[in-house]
Image (cartoon, grey):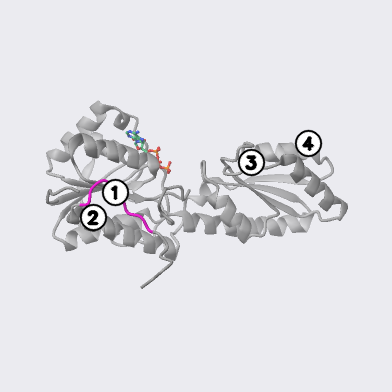
Amino acid sequence: MSTKKVTKIAVLTSGGDAPGMNAAIRAVVRTSLYHGLEVFGVARGYNGMIEDDIIPMDSKSVANIIQRGGTILKTARSKEFFETEGRQVAYNNLKKRGIDGIVVIGGDGSFKGAQKFSNEFDIPCIGIPGTIDKDIAGSDFTIGFDTAVNTAVEAIDKIRDTADAHDRLFVVEVMGRDAGYIALHSGIATGAENILIPETKTDMNALITALTEKEKRKKLVNLIVVAEGDEFGGGTQVGNFLKDKLPNADIRVCILGHIQRGGSPSCLDRLIASRMGYHAVECLLNGTHNVKTLLIINTNPK
Ligand code: ATP
């Protein structure tokens, strides 16, 4: 816990973008203004801190963004921020404006950077989990997951229509980096025959046996959802393996890709982004230091 009174806050988005980041920026800015704090936006993640791309924000600068995907502050990965020299330049740029608190909207990597920065320069940092991958320890929610998984479901439903029309087996690769949440949720929600995720090792021979059985029963429409980080190697590798083992099957591979990152955030993502943004500023005001704003499903509401 820091006892320092925060008066000027900087907010930035870092790492991969996620739908709902704008809603979080809006909540941070408006909550700060409500409490009489000055608030600044940093462009392109930690790069903007190092390159002194930091602008004052007011209520108007976050108008009409709650429904927009992407991030108005832009996001990036910063090599320089890994180095002590880069972080020192970043700190100098904050210090000359009197910025004494930071809200970082991003993933695990961004939080590691924030923690290092906070420890080095004794500046309070709060992390808001913004990632479609839902891979932040301790939080049931991350901003962007709900939108991304709904985008995947909509796309897979469409793929099923064409798979059905042609009696095809489709392998659909979804995002998630090293986590299988998007694959698991979208696969269950679309009735996929198989779901391959990095958290479990798939017995590929058992999969071939099951698909061969289905071929014999003339069940030719099959949907296999694969997480990009699956240990077998993602959609293309799985598709090639199946084509090799099932030469009579009509097999197609579809990589959903970046479509999952874009689009207007869902209602749930707007809500959690707004709540987390509000809570991040409250943490800074209460002297809470070096934490993530986490949302855990309350199973025992009182
Ligand atoms: P996503 O989950 O969408 O990839 P992320 O926040 O995990 O988001 P990273 O690329 O891992 O994305 O990290 C974003 C940035 O955070 C890095 O480019 C770097 O500037 C900073 N960062 C990450 N790890 C560290 C670290 N150990 N020390 C200093 N800075 C770091």
Residue type indicated by callout 3:
Lys
Q: Is residue 248 above or below residue 293?
A: above
The answer to whether 166 appears left or right of 114 in the picture is: right
Residue 67, given in percent of the width and then of the height, sits at: 39, 62
The secondary structure type at the circle numbered 2 is: helix
Q: Amino acid at mark 1?
A: Val
Contact check, label 1 and label 4, Cβ < 8 Å: no
- Residue bearing mark 1: 291
Overall secondary structure of the magenta stretch? Answer: loop
- Please tell me which of labels 4 and 2 falls first in the chain: 4
Residue ID at (62%, 58%)? 188
Q: Pointer 4 and pointer 2: residues touching (CB < 8 Å)?
A: no
Image quadrant of residue 232?
top right
Which residue is denoted by mark 2 in the rendering? 283
Three-letter amino acid code at disc 4?
A: Asp
Kind of residue indicated by mark 2: Cys
Give the numbered dot on residue 201: 3
Single out the residue that lies furthest toward the right.
Answer: 216
Q: Which residue is mark 4?
A: 244
State the extent of the magenta-drawn residues as a range: 288-295
253 vs 185: above or below: above
Q: Is residue 294 magenta?
A: yes
CA–CA distance between discs 1 and 4?
A: 49 Å
Which of disc 3 and disc 4 is earlier in sequence? 3
> In the image, residue 270 lies at what x, y percent?
39, 62
Q: Is residue 116 visible?
A: yes
